[in-house]
Amino acid sequence: VLLISSKYEEIWPLAINDMINMSDSTYSRDQILAMEKAILSRLGCVLLISSKYEEIWPLAINDMINMSDSTYSRDQILAMEKAILSRLGWYLMVPTPYMFTVWYVNASLPTEIEMENMVLFFIELGLMDYLVTIRNNPSMLAASAVYAARCTLNKTPAWIETLKHYTGYTEDQLGDCAKSLVSFYASASDNKFNVVYKKYVNPDRGAVACFPPATSLSVVNRHK
């Protein structure tokens, strides 16, 4: 990998002999070249897969053959592509809280940028905490962020029927996660959340981190 990156980044890339010396002659010239070829072949297949996923006009197999200087045949490239996808279980992405955020914010206050920034602030605070991330699925974290944001901005009622319908969560179900988010918010400027705090104290983000934290969550108080 160091050899490949040096060829890409440096004016004077490393030579094969440099790699032999760096490995204390553990690998021969042929072994190093074979490893380089293997890595590049897999990177090429990753490029093919990502272009199919991201681009309007993805790379064709012939493009990959040309890029590899005809080192690999069509069947070999397809076999490597299938092997990579099989190892990934054919899952190329997983849901994140952000995938639910736009939908939930629109169901709450669709035209209020302050609400959107506040929700994003709560989500990023939650993602900074390992336990919150593993205990709550992405839709729960997004819904709890909306609930906590509405409480912080003193929106009443805190949880409306529209949000219940679109999120699938009741106010009771959001209590524990929302309580954690509000506690992170209250101390964000003093601990591991400081980076997120600095981001959202910026006027470009509505300075939502400067708002006083919610003093009460109806669900939390009811569960005490």
Image: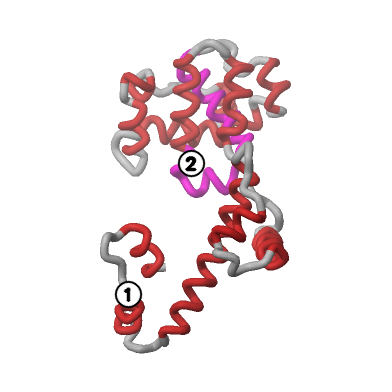
Q: Which residue is mark 2?
A: 127
In the rendered image, the vertical position of residue 112 relative to residue 27, given as above or below: above
Disc 1 secondary structure class: loop
Q: Residue 113 placed where, x, y %?
A: 47, 15
Q: Residues within 10 Å of mark 1 (few under 14, many from 20)?
A: few
Q: Quadrant of the C terminus?
A: top right
In primary-sequence order, the first of circles 2 and 1 is 1
Q: CA distance from mark 2 to mark 1?
A: 43 Å
In the rendered image, the vertical position of residue 130 relative to residue 224, given as above or below: below
User: At 55% across and 24% down in the image, what residue appears?
Assistant: 146
- Secondary structure character of the magenta stretch overall: helix
Q: Taking 91 as reference, is 152 left or right?
A: left
Q: Taking 56 as reference, is 204 left or right?
A: left
Q: Nearer the viewer, residue 107 or 15?
A: 15
Q: Taking 129 as reference, is 164 left or right?
A: right
User: At 37% across and 35% down in the image, what residue appears?
Assistant: 196
Q: Residue 108 placed where, x, y %?
A: 60, 16
Q: Which marked residue is nearer to the observer: mark 2 or mark 1?
A: 1
Q: Residue 64 placed where, x, y %?
A: 60, 57
Q: Nearer the viewer, residue 219 or 135?
A: 135
Task: Look at label 1 and name its amino acid.
Answer: Ala
In the rendered image, the vertical position of residue 54 relative to residue 60, given as above or below: above
Q: Residues within 10 Å of mark 2 (few under 14, many from 20)?
A: some
Asked where in the image residue 15 lies, by quadrant, the reply is bottom left
Q: Is residue 188 magenta?
A: no
Task: Look at label 2 and name its amino acid.
Answer: Leu
Magenta range is: 126-154
Could one spot residue 137 in this view of the protein? no
Q: Nearer the viewer, residue 159 or 69?
A: 69
Q: Which residue is mark 1?
A: 15
Q: Quadrant of the N terminus?
A: bottom left
